[in-house]
Amino acid sequence: MKKFFFVTITTLAPVALFAQEYYHLPDNRQISVQLISIPAMIFVLYLVGAFILNIIRITLDHRLRSKLVDKGVTDKVAGQFLQPASRDLRSQALKWCLMLTGMGIGLTAVYYTLPLDIHSLAIMAFSIALSYLAYFLYLKYTEQP
């Protein structure tokens, strides 16, 4: 994994350093195309990798449960070993949903408050913080007896 990351960075660094195309903002400032496209590509690759790893983990959990049942362990005991994982998957899915929703709301607010400046970072930080707060409150109220 480290080799892949190193090769990717060394391959994309010259492209980012010698970029000639720019996005023009409404106030005639310019942003490099690579400044937007490279982080977007890295984010998409991360999401695809996380999805593949989750599929592998679910498959291995299913195999483990099957092996435990084949060895004569009761279904109840096998379910107790793997039950927290299913609840964890649900909370992880909700966390990602809240994070992406918060980022979407933040980016929408940034779009409507152009030009891009330090207040754009503040809007994004605030929207992501609200997403984490919503997730914390969800965990707090679901853990109560």
Image (spheres, rainbow, N blue to C red):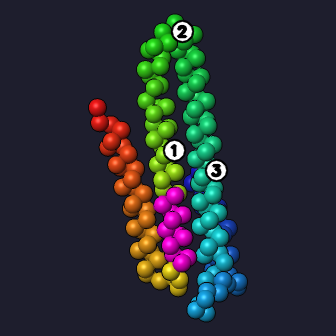
Q: Residues within 10 Å of mark 3 (few under 14, many from 20)?
A: few
Q: Is residue 18 above or below residue 138?
A: below
Task: Tell me which amino acid carries mark 1.
Answer: Ala
Secondary structure at numbered mark 3: helix
Q: Who is closer to the viewer here, 59 or 92?
A: 92
Disc number for residue 71? 2
Q: CA distance from mark 1 to mark 3?
A: 15 Å
Check disc 3 and report the residue beneath it: 48
- Residue at 40% in and 50% down: 135
Q: Earlier in the sequence, mark 2 or mark 3?
A: 3
Residue 19's x, y, as percent?
68, 81
Q: CA distance from mark 2 to mark 3?
A: 35 Å
Residue 134 vertical placement versus 142 (above, below): below
Q: Position of residue 21 (x, y in %)?
A: 71, 83
Residue 128 rendering spot, x and y as whole percentages: 43, 62
Residue extent of the magenta highlight: 101-112
Occupied quadrant, residue 83: top left
- What's under tag 2, amino acid-wise? Lys
The total of numbered circles placed on residues is 3
The image position of residue 20, as x and y in percent, is 70, 85
Q: Residue at x 41, y 68 (%)?
A: 125
Q: Nearer the viewer, mark 1 or mark 2?
A: 1
On the image, numbered disc 1 is attached to which residue?
93
| 1 or 2: tag closer to the N-terminus | 2
Residue that lies at the very extreme toward the top in this rendered image = 72
